[in-house]
Image (cartoon, helix red, strand yellow):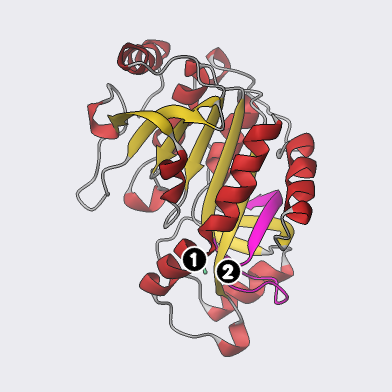
Amino acid sequence: MRLSEQQLQESTAYLKEKGFDTPEIGIVLGTGLGQLVNAIENPITAHYNHIPFFPLATVEFHPGKLIYGTIEGKKAVVMEGRFHLYEGYDFIDVTYPIRIMHQLGIHKLFVSNAAGAINRTYKKGDIMLIEDHLNLQGGSPLAFGNVSEFGDRFVDMSEPYDLDMRLKLIAIAKREKINLQKGVYAAVIGPQLETKAEYRMLKIIGADAVGMSTVPEVIIANHLRLPIVAVSVLTDECDPDNLEPVDIQEIIRIANEAEPKMIKLFTELIKEL
Ligand code: HPA
């Protein structure tokens, strides 16, 4: 896909027409993390496949939707389901919804994902605040010809995750007695899980968690100067010396179980913004 200002404007116009009126906050919900939508009051739903110029759904892609409404009294737009590189989308596709939420007017972005725990002291069911990342996806959502029409070409990544929101989340976790781990998220393409040798490598190069999303979205948020905060729900323990075969149903079950903690963190943060 190639990015054009006109496409962005048509996508945005469709949503504004439906009533997506100047949301303040954008939220991306990761795999197995859909329950936050129950907290949206007066929801308006737009299916991805009805929004002009949204990436086209692949056969196996669960139809995702954008939901607009209020959460804790603030106007928000929530992405239920995201596009992944492993589904065959390119970097511009997977970050298109972030640009649309930005055009709608959000000035804060919250992102969640399910990830494997590389740090041996982190356990499945833990929540990890992402402090930094490793882009191992072999590309960038900013590597296209006319990027400078949309923002800087050379984007600073010295502090990609907003410090103020991170400190707020740390304080909220303490107050709510949620054990919040902190660390570096490594993004791979997938969809295959990692080999033992790959998990060893990820540990050596400084990852605390590994997953298949988020980093392109974070790069675009920085490109748009949109403050972002991101958390991983750790769904499996990637111990190369005792590696068990992966069970995707189990990953989704753990994500569901741990999700209330993430919802608490996000809704409390919304109250404080
Ligand atoms: N690796 C990559 N992605 C993941 C994992 C993992 O172990 N667990 C959940 N998402």
Helix, strand or loop under label 2: loop
Residue 226 sits in quarter: top right
> 20 and 264: which one is in front?
264
Q: Which residues are magenta?
A: 115-134
Which residue is farthest left?
59
Instruction: Kindly check if marks 2 and 1 are in contact, taking CB atoms under 8 A apart as contact.
Output: yes
Amino acid under disc 1: Glu
Above or below: residue 231 compared with residue 256 = above
- State the quadrant of the N terminus: top left
**Mark 1 or mark 2, which is nearer the start of the sequence?**
2
The residue wearing badge 1 is: 257
Query: Where does residue 26 sit, x and y in percent of width and height?
Result: 52, 31
Disc 2 versus disc 1: distance between alpha carbons? 7 Å
Query: Where does residue 238 sit, x and y in percent of width and height?
Result: 58, 76
Q: What residue sits 64% from the left and 56% below the top? A: 185
Question: For this view, does 43 lie left or right of residue 114?
Answer: left
Residue 221 lies in the magenta-colored region: no
Q: What residue sits 40% from the left and 48% below the top? A: 84
Q: Residues within 10 Å of mark 2 (few under 14, many from 20)?
A: many
Q: Nearer the viewer, mark 2 or mark 1?
A: 1
Query: Where does residue 154 sit, x and y in percent of width and height?
Result: 68, 27
Above or below: residue 227 compared with residue 63 = above
Above or below: residue 98 compared with residue 174 = above
Helix, strand or loop under label 1: helix
Amino acid under disc 2: Gly
Does residue 114 show up?
yes
Number of on-image labels: 2
As drawn, the label of residue 125 is: 2
